[in-house]
C-alpha cells in the first residue's frame, strides 16, 4: 500500500482553491435543469473531482494511448501538460524506447480533454514516477501486438521477430513497415485498446537506447523560430480581446457601475454577471479603453482591517484553525518530546519566517474561449486540465463532455497554474459576445489576482546530549504546509506539527511547496545545533542522517565542492555552507560560498555546487537544466523575493519592484553533480532541487559572520 | 487613426490604426506575427524584444508611430528558408529552451549583442542580457548558447 499512501501524502500538500466566480446563468441553469438531471451530473462530477483531487492518476490506464494511421505514423496520448519541465520530451522518449521506433516517428498529444485519458493534474512531480511507466507499458504491449499482427500476416510464429527503428523484421529476412501492418489489421486503435499491458516486460535501464540519453525538446525548432503557438498566440476567426474589471482591493464588493460607459468605445461588448464585469473588443487597446471607462463609474465597498505584510507572522500564529480535509492541522510524534526537552542540558530554540512569494511565470494567465452550438472549446495554460474543464462545465451549466479543454505547451507553471480563472473569464465574455474571446492577464493582474506560495512560520526546539546527538526534535509549521517536514536525522523523540492558518492572501502550490520552508528552517537550525555541539556541520550531518541516499548526495556535493578544505581555509568575511534534503523520493544537497562586505552587510554568492539523485536518469540535459534552474529560482527567494501588501492591496505588483533572479544573479561557478542510480525507479526532478540552496547560503553567512539569519529573504543586519 | 509604413522581416507593411498602440500589440493582433511575447508591458522583462534597425527594442514600450520607415525583424524573420541562425541552433544544442516563452526575446537580444560585439566575454553577455527575464531561470544554458554561437560565427567569419 506504499504507493497509495504516497499519493495521499502528495495530494494533501497540493493547495487548490474553489473557482472564483458563480455566474447567474449557472444558477439559473441549475434550477431549470433539476428535472432533466443533466446538470446534476455536471455538479456531481465537479464534487467528485474535488474529492478525488490529484489521485486520478492512480486510475490511469495504459489503454487508448496510441493511434497509428495509414502511413504508419504514431500518435501517443497523455493527459499531462508541458510547462517547460520536459514532460513532452520524456513521455515521447518513453514511448519510443518501448515501441522500438525513433523518437521522430511519434507525435504526442497532451492535455486535450476530448482526446486524451485523464491522467490527473501535472503537479507533485508525478509524471516521471506514475505516467512514464504507464506510457512504457502501453508502448511495450503495442510493440508486441504489432509484431504479432505482422507475423500473422506472414503466417510465422513471433519467435525471431522484432521491431527495429519502426520496421518489423523476421529472422527469415522478412520486413514490414507499420503502414503495411496497419493496412491489413482492421481497426488497429480498437485492437490496441483491448490489449492488456499489465504483464508486459519493460526494457531494463542497462538496455535503454533512448531513455538515459539527451534529446532536445520536440518543439525546440518551433520555439526558436517563433512558430510555437502558446495560448496567448492563438487567433480564432472573429476573435475579440478581453479585459476584466478588477476590484481596487481584496474583498471589495461592487455596489454599482454604469455599464453604458463602455458604449463610447467602438466594437465593444460588455457584460456584468454578479461580481463579474468584463469587456471584449477588436483590439486589446480598445478593450483597455473600455474597461478603464467602466472602472471610472464603479463604486465599491472595501473591506477594512486587513492584515499587512508587516504584521504577517504575528497574524498567522494568532489565526490557527483546525482546517479540514487535506488542509487540516495535524501532529505526528514518536517518543516523549516534552520530557526529553525538559531534562536536557543543551536546548536550542528558534523561529523562522518565509514571506509569500509568487511563481511569476513568463506567460501570464491566458485563455481563448469559443462557443459553437452547444459546445465550448477553451485553450488555456493550466496544470489541471480535466478539473478546469469541469469548473467550466459547472460555471456554464453544461455537461462535462460538451466542454473541450486544450492546454497548448505553456509558458511556465511552477505550481502556479492550477486554477482556471482566465478560462472562465474568457468563456463568460465569449458567451455574451457570441464570438471567440482571448484573454491574457497583465503582469499586474498576475501579481495581484493569481496566488502565492504560502508564507510560513517555523518553530523549532531541539536538545543535544553530551556527545552531540539530537535527543529531542520539535518542529511546528504555521501555514506553509507539511511537505518535507520530517526530520531525516536520528533522534528518539520527534514531533512535527502542521498548523492550518487563516491566510491573508490566496495561496496555492509552488515548486516543492512547503519543503522549501521546512528545509530552510531545519537545515539552518542543524548548523546552530552543530555549532552548539562543537562539531563541523558536514560531520554532524554525516553522523546523524539515517537515509543512505541522502548521505550519498551530501557527500557527493561536499566532495565536488571541496567543502572541508575550503571551509578550513576560508578567507576573512567568506563563509561556506552546506545543506541537504529529500522530498518526493529524490535527494539533494547544495554547498555555497558567500563573501560578506562587513561595512555594507551586502553579500555575494561565489561558488555553488548541487548534487541531485532521482533514481535512473531519463534525459541528462533536461535534468541538468531542471536542477540548475531550480537552484537559481531558489536564489530569488534567498536574495529578494517577498510580496508586500497592505489594506488588501499588493504593494509591489511589477517586475521592477518584485525582483526575480536575472543573469547577474547566476553564481560565477555552479557545479551540478547528477548521481545516476539505474538500479532505482526514476522519480521527478522538477521540484526538489530547489530546497537546499537557501539554507546552504544561510549557513555560509553564519560561517562568515557568526550571524544566524532566521528569515527569507536573507538580509544581514 | 494614422497610417504607418515599415518593413517587417523584409516585407513592406502598412498599418492604419491608432498610432498610440504599441508595436507589440499591432504585430500580434493586426499582423498575426506572434513571436514577440507580452511579459510585463513595462519593458522590465524583454520577452517582447524585436530588432528595429538592428537594435534590440522592447516592442511593448514602442508606439507604432516610432517605427515609421524602419526595419523591424522578429524571431520569425531570422531563419533563411529552413536554415536556423547560429544563435537559434545554439539555443537548441545547449538546451537553452525550457518553456520557451522568453526565448524569442533572448535570441533577438543575443543577436543584437553579437552583431555589435562578435566575441563578448561572459561578463559582457551577462551585462547585455541582464534585462531579459527567464522564469525557468535557464540562464546558464542561455549564456553557454550565446558563447557557442559566438564561437561558430567566429569560425564562419574566418
Image: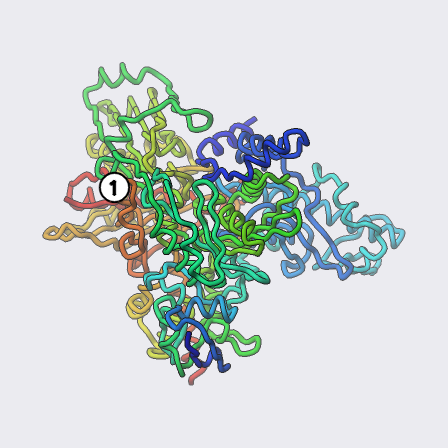
| Towards the viewer: A343 or A656 | A656
At horizontal 40% and vertical 45% (from top left) the residue drawn is A450
Q: As displayed, is residue A270 above or below residue A10? A: below
Task: Find residue A454 and report its image quarter.
Answer: top left
Residue furthest out toward the left: A599
Residue A402 horizontal side relative to residue A416, left or right? right
Identify the secondary structure beneath mark 1: strand
Colour scheme in use: rainbow
Task: Find residue A228 and report its image quarter.
Answer: bottom right
Percent coordinates x, y for residue A543 in the rendering: 32, 32
Residue A378 in view here: yes
Residue A236 horizontal side relative to residue A531, left or right? right
Residue furthest out toward the right: A155
Percent coordinates x, y for residue A292 in the rendering: 37, 55
Task: Find residue B113 and report its image quarter.
Answer: bottom left
Residue furthest out toward the bottom: B158
* Residue identifier under label 1: A646
| Towards the viewer: A205 or B76 | B76
Percent coordinates x, y for residue B153 in the rendering: 43, 78
Q: Quadrant of the C terminus of chain B?
A: bottom left
| Towards the viewer: A423 or A107 | A423
User: What is the chain identity of the residue bearing mark 1?
Assistant: A
Residue B60 horizontal side relative to residue A182, left or right? left
Residue A581 horizontal side relative to residue A435, left or right? left
Q: Quadrant of the N terminus of chain B?
A: bottom left
| Towards the viewer: A203 or A348 | A348
Count of residue discs: 1
Percent coordinates x, y for residue A420 in the rendering: 49, 44
User: How busy is the neighbourhood of tag 1: few (under 14 within 10 Å), some, or many (20 plus)?
Assistant: some
Residue B147 in view here: no
Q: As displayed, is residue A130 above or below residue A474? A: below
At horizontal 72% and vertical 52% (from top left) the residue drawn is A67
Amino acid at each position: 500500500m506504499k504507493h497509495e499512501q504516497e499519493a495521499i501524502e502528495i495530494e494533501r500538500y497540493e493547495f487548490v482553491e474553489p473557482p472564483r466566480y458563480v455566474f447567474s446563468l449557472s444558477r439559473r441553469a441549475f434550477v431549470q435543469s433539476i428535472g432533466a438531471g443533466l446538470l446534476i451530473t455536471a455538479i456531481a462530477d465537479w464534487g467528485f473531482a474535488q474529492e478525488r483531487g490529484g489521485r486520478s492518476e492512480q486510475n490511469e490506464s495504459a489503454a487508448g494511448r496510441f493511434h497509428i494511421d495509414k502511413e504508419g505514423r504514431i500518435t501517443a496520448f497523455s493527459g499531462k501538460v508541458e510547462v517547460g519541465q520536459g514532460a513532452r520530451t520524456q513521455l515521447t522518449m518513453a514511448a519510443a524506447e518501448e515501441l522500438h521506433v525513433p523518437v521522430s516517428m511519434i507525435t504526442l498529444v497532451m492535455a486535450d480533454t476530448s482526446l486524451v485519458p485523464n491522467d490527473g493534474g501535472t503537479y507533485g512531480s508525478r509524471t516521471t514516477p506514475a505516467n512514464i511507466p504507464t506510457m512504457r507499458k502501453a508502448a511495450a504491449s503495442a510493440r508486441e501486438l504489432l509484431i504479432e499482427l505482422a507475423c500473422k500476416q506472414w503466417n510465422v510464429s513471433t519467435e525471431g521477430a522484432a521491431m527495429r527503428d519502426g520496421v518489423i523484421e523476421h529472422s527469415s529476412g522478412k520486413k514490414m513497415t507499420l503502414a503495411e501492418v496497419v493496412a491489413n489489421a482492421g481497426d488497429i486503435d480498437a485492437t490496441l485498446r483491448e490489449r492488456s499491458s499489465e504483464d508486459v516486460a519493460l526494457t531494463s535501464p542497462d538496455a535503454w537506447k533512448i531513455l538515459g540519453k539527451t534529446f532536445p525538446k520536440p518543439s525546440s525548432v518551433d520555439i526558436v523560430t517563433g512558430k510555437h503557438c502558446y495560448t496567448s498566440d492563438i487567433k480564432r476567426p472573429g476573435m475579440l480581446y478581453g479585459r476584466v474589471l478588477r476590484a481596487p482591493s481584496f474583498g471589495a464588493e461592487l455596489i454599482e457601475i454604469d455599464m453604458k460607459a463602455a458604449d463610447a468605445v467602438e466594437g465593444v461588448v460588455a457584460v456584468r454577471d454578479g461580481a463579474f464585469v468584463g469587456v471584449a473588443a477588436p483590439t486589446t487597446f480598445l478593450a483597455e479603453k473600455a474597461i478603464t471607462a467602466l472602472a471610472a463609474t464603479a463604486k465599491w465597498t472595501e473591506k477594512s482591517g486587513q492584515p499587512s505584510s508587516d504584521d504577517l507572522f504575528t497574524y498567522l500564529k494568532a489565526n490557527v484553525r483546525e482546517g479540514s480535509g487535506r488542509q487540516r492541522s495535524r501532529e505526528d510524534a514518536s517518543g516523549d518530546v516534552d520530557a526529553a526537552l525538559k531534562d536536557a542540558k543543551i536546548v536550542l530554540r528558534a523561529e523562522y519566517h518565509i514571506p509569500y512569494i509568487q511563481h511569476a511565470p513568463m506567460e501570464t494567465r491566458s485563455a481563448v474561449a469559443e462557443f459553437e452550438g452547444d459546445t465550448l472549446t477553451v485553450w488555456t495554460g493550466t496544470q489541471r486540465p480535466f478539473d478546469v474543464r469541469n469548473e467550466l462545465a459547472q460555471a456554464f451549466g453544461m455537461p462535462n463532455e460538451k466542454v473541450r479543454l486544450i492546454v497548448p505547451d505553456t509558458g511556465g507553471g511552477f505550481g502556479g497554474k492550477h486554477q482556471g480563472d482566465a478560462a472562465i473569464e474568457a468563456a463568460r465574455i465569449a458567451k455574451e459576445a457570441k464570438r471567440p474571446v482571448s484573454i491574457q492577464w497583465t503582469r499586474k493582474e498576475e501579481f495581484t489576482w493569481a496566488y502565492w506560495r504560502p508564507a510560513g512560520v517555523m518553530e523549532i526546539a531541539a536538545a543535544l546530549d553530551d556527545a552531540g546527538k539530537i535527543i529531542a526534535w520539535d518542529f511546528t509549521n504555521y501555514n506553509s504546509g507539511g511537505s518535507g517536514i520530517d526530520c531525516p536525522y536520528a533522534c528518539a523523540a520527534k514531533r512535527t506539527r502542521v498548523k492550518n492558518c487563516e491566510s491573508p492572501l490566496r495561496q496555492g502550490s509552488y515548486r516543492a511547496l512547503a519543503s522549501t520552508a521546512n528545509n530552510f528552517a531545519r537545515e539552518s537550525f542543524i548548523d546552530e545545533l552543530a555549532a552548539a555541539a562543537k562539531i563541523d556541520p558536514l560531520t554532524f550531518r554525516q553522523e546523524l542522517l539515517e537515509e543512505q541516499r541522502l548521505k550519498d548526495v551530501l557527500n557527493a556535493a561536499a566532495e565536488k565542492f571541496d567543502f572541508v578544505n575550503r571551509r578550513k581555509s576560508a578567507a576573512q568575511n567568506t563563509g561556506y555552507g552546506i545543506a541537504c534534503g529529500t522530498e518526493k523520493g529524490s535527494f539533494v544537497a547544495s554547498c555555497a560560498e558567500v563573501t560578506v562586505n562587513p561595512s555594507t552587510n551586502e553579500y555575494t554568492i561565489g561558488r555553488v555546487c548541487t548534487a541531485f539523485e532521482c533514481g535512473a536518469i531519463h534525459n541528462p540535459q533536461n535534468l541538468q537544466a531542471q536542477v540548475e534552474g531550480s537552484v537559481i529560482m531558489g536564489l530569488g527567494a534567498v536574495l529578494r523575493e517577498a510580496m508586500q501588501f497592505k489594506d488588501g492591496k499588493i504593494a509591489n505588483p511589477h517586475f521592477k519592484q518584485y525582483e526575480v533572479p536575472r543573469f547577474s544573479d547566476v553564481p560565477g561557478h555552479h557545479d551540478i553533480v547528477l548521481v545516476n542510480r539505474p538500479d532505482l525507479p526514476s522519480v521527478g526532478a522538477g521540484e526538489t532541487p530547489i530546497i537546499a540552496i537557501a539554507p546552504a547560503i544561510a549557513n555560509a553567512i553564519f560561517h562568515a559572520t557568526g550571524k544566524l539569519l532566521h528569515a527569507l529573504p536573507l538580509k544581514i543586519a | 487613426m494614422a497610417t504607418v509604413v515599415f518593413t517587417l522581416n523584409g516585407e513592406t507593411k502598412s498599418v492604419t490604426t491608432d498610432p498610440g498602440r504599441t508595436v507589440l500589440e499591432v504585430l500580434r493582433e493586426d499582423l498575426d506575427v506572434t513571436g514577440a511575447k507580452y511579459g510585463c508591458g513595462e519593458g522590465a522583462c524583454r520577452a517582447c524584444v524585436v530588432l528595429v534597425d538592428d537594435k534590440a527594442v522592447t516592442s511593448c514600450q514602442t508606439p507604432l508611430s516610432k517605427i515609421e520607415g524602419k526595419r523591424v525583424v522578429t524571431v520569425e524573420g531570422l531563419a533563411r528558408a529552413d536554415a536556423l541562425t547560429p544563435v537559434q541552433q545554439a539555443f537548441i544544442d545547449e538546451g537553452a529552451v525550457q518553456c520557451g516563452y522568453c526565448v524569442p526575446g533572448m535570441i533577438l537580444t543575443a543577436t543584437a549583442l553579437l552583431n555589435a560585439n562578435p566575441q563578448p566575454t561572459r561578463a559582457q553577455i551577462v551585462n547585455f542580457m541582464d534585462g531579459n527575464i527567464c522564469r525557468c531561470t535557464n540562464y546558464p544554458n542561455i549564456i553557454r548558447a550565446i558563447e557557442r554561437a559566438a564561437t561558430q560565427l567566429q569560425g564562419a567569419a574566418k
